[in-house]
Image: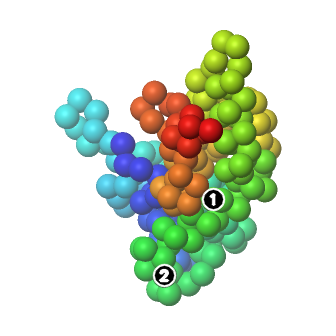
């Protein structure tokens, strides 16, 4: 599966090409174009997300501020390089996380709380989300913490076992 960052970049670019009446229209347009960013392989066959599947990412782009309420990019698309977008994406997700109640500090505190419990509990995204109780859904929380820009800015990452791990927490 393609990471989330390229999907958000593609949404940003397509939204900057023309005016879209609503989220569904933008999602349909992206799905119709069959971009690799919105594809996956199943039984040796490349398949593409449906407009509904794309819409989940468009909704996320709106929530974090990549698109505004009129579905326009936060800045003119020809003014932003991919690297600049990734940097801004990390900043926007970090701001969204703070506003939603799951800042890096809160995640680290929740990790420590879970690890120090008797018996200790692994700090998975689900257990962190339950403990912190941010204002966003678990699904949006999971998308946000998997944005590479957020990972780069905070040093937090989720591994295949879906467990938070930061070495300095264990050394303190």
| Identity of the residue drawn at 72% across and 29% down | 113
Structural crowding at the residue carrying mark 1, measured as other residues with C-alpha within 10 Å and reported as few (<14), some (14–19) or many (≥20): many
Residue furthest to the left: 44
Compared across the picture, whether 113 is left or right of 19 comes to right
Whether 30 is drawn above or below 145: the answer is below
Q: Quadrant of the N terminus?
A: top left
Structural crowding at the residue carrying mark 2, measured as other residues with C-alpha within 10 Å and reported as few (<14), some (14–19) or many (≥20): few
Compared across the picture, whether 139 is left or right of 9 comes to right
Residue 82 percent location from the top left of the image: 42, 74
Q: Which structural element holds mark 2? A: loop
135 or 91, nearer to the observer = 91
| Identity of the residue drawn at 48% across and 68% down | 86
Whether 70 is drawn above or below 132: the answer is below
Q: Which structural element holds mark 1? A: helix
Q: Earlier in the sequence, mark 2 or mark 1?
A: 2
Residue at the disc numbered 1: 93
46 or 24, nearer to the observer = 46
Residue at the disc numbered 2: 80
106 or 79, nearer to the observer = 106
The answer, for residue 158, to whether it is visible in the render is yes
Residue 96 percent location from the top left of the image: 71, 58
């Amino acid at each position: 599966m393609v990471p989330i960052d390229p999907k958000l970049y593609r949404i940003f670019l397509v939204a900057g090409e023309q005016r879209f009446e609503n989220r569904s229209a933008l999602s349909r347009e992206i799905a119709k174009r069959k971009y690799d960013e919105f594809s996956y392989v199943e039984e040796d066959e490349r398949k593409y997300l449906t407009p509904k599947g794309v819409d989940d990412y468009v909704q996320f782009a709106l929530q974090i501020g990549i698109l505004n309420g009129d579905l326009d990019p936060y800045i003119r698309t020809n003014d932003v390089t991919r690297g600049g977008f990734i940097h801004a994406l990390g900043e926007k997700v970090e701001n969204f996380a703070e506003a939603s109640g799951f800042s890096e500090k809160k995640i680290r505190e929740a990790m420590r709380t879970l690890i120090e419990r008797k018996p200790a509990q692994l700090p998975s995204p689900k257990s962190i989300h339950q403990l912190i109780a941010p204002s966003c859904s678990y699904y949006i929380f999971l998308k946000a913490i998997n944005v590479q820009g957020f990972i780069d800015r905070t040093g937090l990452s989720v591994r295949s076992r879906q467990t938070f791990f930061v070495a300095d927490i264990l050394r303190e």
